[in-house]
Structure formats: structure tokens, C-alpha cells
Image (cartoon, rainbow, N blue to C red):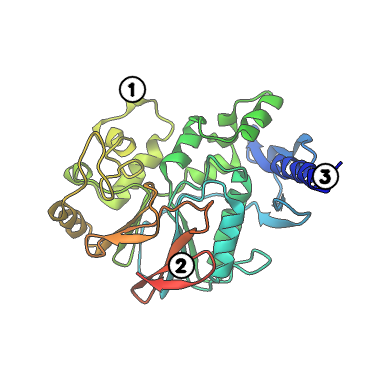
Amino acid sequence: MKREKIQIYAFLIFAVSVLSQDGPYLLFLNSLDSVISVRSDITGTITADTLKTPDKVKVTKPGDNGFFVVPVSPTKIEGTCVYTEPEEIFAVSDLEGNFSAFVEILFNNGIIDKELNWAFGKGHLVLNGDMVDRGEFVTQVLWLIRKLETEAEQKGGKVHYLLGNHDVMLMQGDVRYAADKYHDLAKKTGRDLKDYFGGDTYFGKWMRGKNAVEKIGKTIFVHGGLSTELLKADLSINEINGLLRNNIDSPDSLLNEDSDLIFGSFGPLWYRGLITSQKKYEKIKIADLDKILDYYEADRIVAGHCIVDEVSDDFKGKVVRIDVDHYEEESCGIFIEKGEIFKAKKSGKRIKL
């Protein structure tokens, strides 16, 4: 057999083994005192153990024999959605289960160290939605976020995990965009994939406590956007988040007009009008954008959801677009330092926006 064929086969075996790594998922039983812990190892072997709720879990890093440890601390509802501006903010969006890009961009921009520990001091890390679906390492991404949340708070910093449309879809059981490996795991354990993100799971309880919109200083962070239709509803940021959180598990037939708006095309999860036109609406006009900014006493909106060739701004800096393809070399976020905004490349290079 030729050497190149051996190398190809070896790579395929490695790739399959790496993709087999998943979990752990923690599914609560009758109380929060015990769980079923489900994981898949590098050989594809699935284990489902009933045990007392652990105080920490080991999460295998994709592609190597290492792991990182995450405390399984009680989840909570994010009670704050408006923050004073810290000296430094790093924001990135739409990682979609891409663990390697997530780690690389955080490490090269000084957010974490080589051991995946928080290294950003009192800085704020904003994850602007869609951290799940499509990618092969969703659970590793989620556990790393949980780890960094805990460590950031201990250092006076903050991790803001904002919900995007895919995060909410996964919680609601719309799993059509999840990679095949997740469907396979669910099938082999005799469950539906939605069961792993329900309200009786650790991931599900934790994610259901998150906000969809937050304001830090004079900057609003939201996955999709804020529309004129949402403005007409006269909802505060706190009310928007409350409506979303309280109705994630409600059937459509029970949604009132405001909550139906939150989950619809003009809501913060799905609206694209800050960046582009759609069949249902044209791109927002500057006068309407100004009304939204004035209402929420903000200078700009940072949005993901609509993929763009590069991180960029529009409307003279009033909209900042940060959804780029993190599977390409242009993986990028933004760094806000003392009010100035920079493109923050995956390499760590920064360019003033």
C-alpha cells in the first residue's frame, strides 16, 4: 500500500475517533440530587451512569488525550441585562460547535491561557448567540463556556452567553441542524435529542436562564437585531428577555402577541433587517435605527445571525456585524477597549474598525 494511502486511512480513523467524543450530558432524575450522566468516548463507546450529581465533570478536549475540568455549580437566571462598560470587551458570534476556532480566537486574544483558564481579568466576554448546532463539538463548547463563566466571576470579569435562534431551537426540540453524531447518540440511548437539552437537564436549565439582549455601556448586543415592530411593542430590554425566557417551552397556541413577536421574524433571535433585506421586510432605514437607539439610550447595536465576509460596521458605526465563517481563516470577533472598536482576528491581530 502506498504511503499516501496509509496516511489517508490513518487520518480517517483519527477523524472518526475524534468525532466520537461527546458529553457529558447530565439528565436530572426525580430531584437535583442525582443524574444520568451520558458520554461517548474516543472509541464511540457510550456510557450512561446513574450517580449523585457531581460537583465537577471532566470534559475531553477534541483531538487529544487531555481534558478540562468544569465545576457543576447551580445554574441561575441572569437577573441583570444592563451593565456599565468595563475597560475591555471581547465579542464573538455564531461559533456553532467549532471548539478549535473558539479556543484559538480566545487564546490568541488573551481571553484564556493554554490550559483554557480565564485570563481576561475584569474584562467581559460576549458570546452573541448560536454557540450550538451544525458543528461537531457542541458539548465541549458549552462546557468551556460554563467553565469560563465561573472563573470570570471569581476574577471580577463576566461572560455573557446570549441566546441565538439556534440555541433556542435546540432547547425547543428543533434539532434539524444538529450534526449526525448527536442524533446517533440519542438513538443509541433510546431517547430523542431534544431530551438532552430539556428543562430537566443541566444544559437545559443553564441555557434557559440566559438573556437574548443585553446592553453594556452604550452598546446593545443581540444575536439577530431589534426591529421597528419590536420598538412599537414598547418593551424594555428586561421585558424582552423575560418574555423569551418564560415562553421557551410554551406551545405557539399559548403565545400572546408580545411573546409571539419575540420568537418571530421581527424578534431579537431572527430579525435580519439591521444588516439585509428579507422577503418580509426591507433593510432598516437610518431614521428608524436612530429611533431604536434613542429608545434604548444606546449608540450602537452589535449583531450576529447574518453571515458577512468580514467583521464590519454600517450606518456610520451604529451597527456592527460580527457573524463570520469561523471554519475559514477569517474567523474574527471584536475587541472594545475604552470605547474604541477593533476587529480581533483569530491570530490575535487587531485592526481598528
Q: Determine crowd level at label 3: few under 14, some 14-19, many 20+ residues with C-alpha closer than 10 A.
A: few
Marks 1, 3: nearer the viewer:
3
Three-letter code, disc 1: Ser
The residue lying at 49 percent from left, 58 percent from top is 331
The residue lying at 79 percent from left, 43 percent from top is 5
Q: How many marks?
A: 3
Left or right of residue 228, residue 259 in this image: right
Nearest the eye: 186 or 321: 321
The C terminus lies in quadrant: bottom left
Residue marked by disc 1: 253
The N terminus lies in quadrant: top right
Nearest the eye: 18 or 171: 18
> Marks 2/3: CA distance?
39 Å
> Marks 1/2: CA distance?
43 Å
Three-letter code, disc 2: Ala
Q: Determine crowd level at label 1: few under 14, some 14-19, many 20+ residues with C-alpha closer than 10 A.
A: few
Nearest the eye: 234 or 321: 321
From the top left corner, tell me how far across and down residue 186 is, in percent: 65, 29
Secondary-structure class at tag 2: strand
Q: Would residue 1 be seen by someone viewing this image from the given angle?
A: yes
Left or right of residue 341, residue 56 in this image: right
Three-letter code, disc 3: Ile
Badge number at residue 6: 3
Residue marked by disc 2: 344
Q: Are the residues tagged 1 and 3 within 8 Å (C-beta)? A: no
Secondary-structure class at tag 3: helix
